[in-house]
Amino acid sequence: MLVLASASPRRKELLGQLVRHFEVCPADIDETPYQDESASDYVLRMAHEKALAATNKLQQGQLADTPFVVLASDTSVVVEGKILGKPNDFEESKAMLRMLSDRDHQVMTSVCLYDPMREHLQLTNVVSDVSFRAISDVEIAQYWRSGEPQDKAGSYAIQGLGAVFVRSVSGSYSAVVGLPLYETSQLLALFGIHSLEEMSHE
Ligand SMILES: Cc1cn([C@H]2C[C@H](O)[C@@H](COP(=O)(O)OP(=O)(O)OP(=O)(O)O)O2)c(=O)[nH]c1=O
């Protein structure tokens, strides 16, 4: 049994491209970076902690006697070493989009797969480069009113209206949206889950 440890509708949809049957068990953790923690250490730690938190929840509840594999992930936008998570309000969103305006940044998406029974854990970080055009304060306010930036790392969604800011992207498009499909399929194969096999028959 595969369990997606995420409340993100994007991750659920993306994983659905690779696997037909899986459960969802969101994991609530403290997402505050440590002082001086590097962005890559941070995203790897977040995915790891989400996987462990979901594992604890499942072992105490619905899957106490069932073998399972947990998949957790974290996406952060990184600009000049600074980690941008999800904005809490318009002021934070404005500050983030001003930082990203007319500049290149990185999107880091980590993936953790964990089989607690076999004590098998795999962790990876996929880094993509995104280039933004200049964004005016009027556009930042209009974009906020669209409702899109609220629950997105870096305050934008490349798969939505935020695409109007994206001059170019190099790396993994699906990782920027929330789950790197190529790397995830490679990791799933290490746990005996083969997407092409799974999706080709019931
Ligand atoms: C950069 C970017 C991020 N995002 C989203 C993906 C993630 O849902 C979110 C980053 O926040 P995360 O903390 O990675 O994930 P989450 O809180 O939404 O879900 P969970 O922790 O339960 O797995 O930003 C987009 O949808 N499009 C984008 O272009």
Image (cartoon, rainbow, N blue to C red):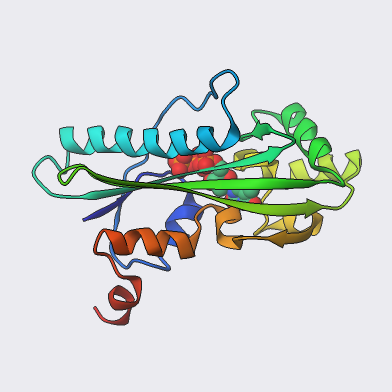
Q: Is residue 83 left or right of residue 17?
A: right
Q: Position of residue 14 (x, y in %)?
A: 47, 61
61, 172: nearer the viewer: 172
Is 61 displayed left or right of 51 in the figure? left
Direction left: furthest residue: 65
x, y percent for residue 18: 39, 67
Find residue 79 and report its horizontal and vertical position in percent: 73, 38
Q: Residue at x 55, y 24 (%)?
A: 33
Query: Could one spot residue 148 in this view of the protein?
Result: no
- Quarter residue 164 falls in: bottom right
Which of the 4 quarters of the picture holds residue 142? top right
Residue at figure coordinates x 29%, y 58% from the top left: 22
Q: Is residue 75 left or right of residue 11?
A: right
Q: Quadrant of the C terminus?
A: bottom left
Q: Nearer the viewer, residue 8 or 54?
A: 54
| Residue at the extreme bottom | 200
How far from the left and from the top, in percent, is residue 26?
37, 40
Which quarter of the image is occupied by the N terminus? bottom left
- The quarter of the picture showing ligand 1: top right
Q: Is residue 194 visible?
A: yes
